[in-house]
Image (spheres, grey):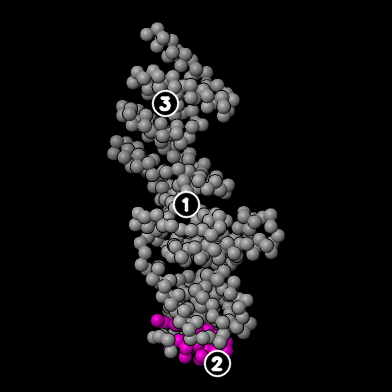
Amino acid sequence: MKVMLVDDEPLALQFLETQLHSIGEFKIVGAYQTSRGLTEKIKEKKPELLFLDIKIGSVNGVELAAAIQEEHPNLPIVFVTGYHEYAVQAFELNALDYIVKPIQKDRLRKTIQRLYTEVQKNTSHAPIQINCMPTLQFLQNGEVLPVQWRTSKAKEVFCYLLHHAGKPIRKDVLIEEFWKDKEPEKAFTQLYSTIYVIRKTLSASLPGLSLRSANQCYQLYLGDAEVDVMEWRNQITHLPELNEHSLSTYQRLLRQYKGDYFSAETYAWAESEQRQLREIWYKTAAQVGVFLEEQNVLEDAISLYLRMQSNYPYIAHSYIRLMHLYDSFGETGEVVSHYERLKQMLEEEFDIAPEAELMDWYESWRKRHMQA
């Protein structure tokens, strides 16, 4: 394994190198007492592990590590420090580990073992499928992963970061969203604690995902994981023109919509996305319904309208189409039933009656069937 060492104390640097050689086969590709030009040296030497002193002269090692992670996000970093107090900062940055001087051989072995474990996790697992509709769920090889969240807040903050996956989210934005009623000091403490819980959860159950920190921001990286809502939105917004050849694709995407975005979690910040996706689904379903009626595939049209009514019972459109379709099949009881359901829904939810045009149609229809 290629290792790079950075420590402004020459004796500490030599001691760390000696300890590494005593516990395994390591190639020291660089041992530096200054951080000058370090990112370029990393690019040139391509180390697989970096040991970094928490304080190199006047340079803050935590800030330096954040800059390194921006350029080399997959490089594991182990902080070396003389003080336990830097541990929170180290893990907040998502360092692999931190070791307190003087470095003990057994402690160093544990760090190296942790690295091998992390590498094995990241390379041995099949891609993860992340579902957000209607609830957060992780699948691998078709099996549900039993991911346990220590707190509901950690789960929600993870979902929020997933909502913005691949984009940096400022810490103050997270504070305003989740802890705006707290005093600043307490709010940041809770934020760091929550981020720590998320990282521990990812490390334990979802090693293909990572949460990184830089420039006062957090950013969730998904690796090769796929997210149902992202895939669904991308496919449905790039559908070809609806015809007999593309109909099955439309129907498949309508079936894939398992429920509204995070609706089981009832997150307020997700409501806008919920509405957008719901409108896309309903608009597409209505388009398919019209096409099925035009092609005289009426039973499929009825099934689709029944699903639309079940999912979104406060939209009158599906009731009206079902009344007309059941009329064409001569099922008078269903026509009456759906009219009464619509009338009741409108009265209870909106305190209004059906539109005059529909009432006239229904009254005319009812008279014809009474005479018959």
For this rendering, which residue is in front, 94 or 8?
94
The residues tagged by marks 3 and 1 sit, at their Cα atoms, a distance apart of 34 Å
Q: Which range is magenta?
A: 1-21
Contact between marks 2 and 1 (CB within 8 A): the answer is no
Contact between marks 2 and 3 (CB within 8 A): the answer is no
Q: Residue furthest right?
A: 183
For this rendering, which residue is in front, 155 or 290?
155
Task: Name the N-terminal-most of marks 2 and 1.
Answer: 2
| Image spot of residue 216 (x, y percent) | 60, 65
Q: Residue 11: give its label.
A: 2
* Amino acid type assigned to the residue bearing label 2 in the image: Leu
Mark 3 = which residue?
Answer: 321
Q: Residue 276: give its label.
A: none
Up the image or down, 271 lies above or below 115; here it is: above
| Image spot of residue 353 (x, y percent) | 55, 21
Q: Which residue lies furthest to the left in this view?
A: 245
| Image spot of residue 27 (x, y percent) | 41, 86
Quadrant of the frame with the N terminus: bottom left
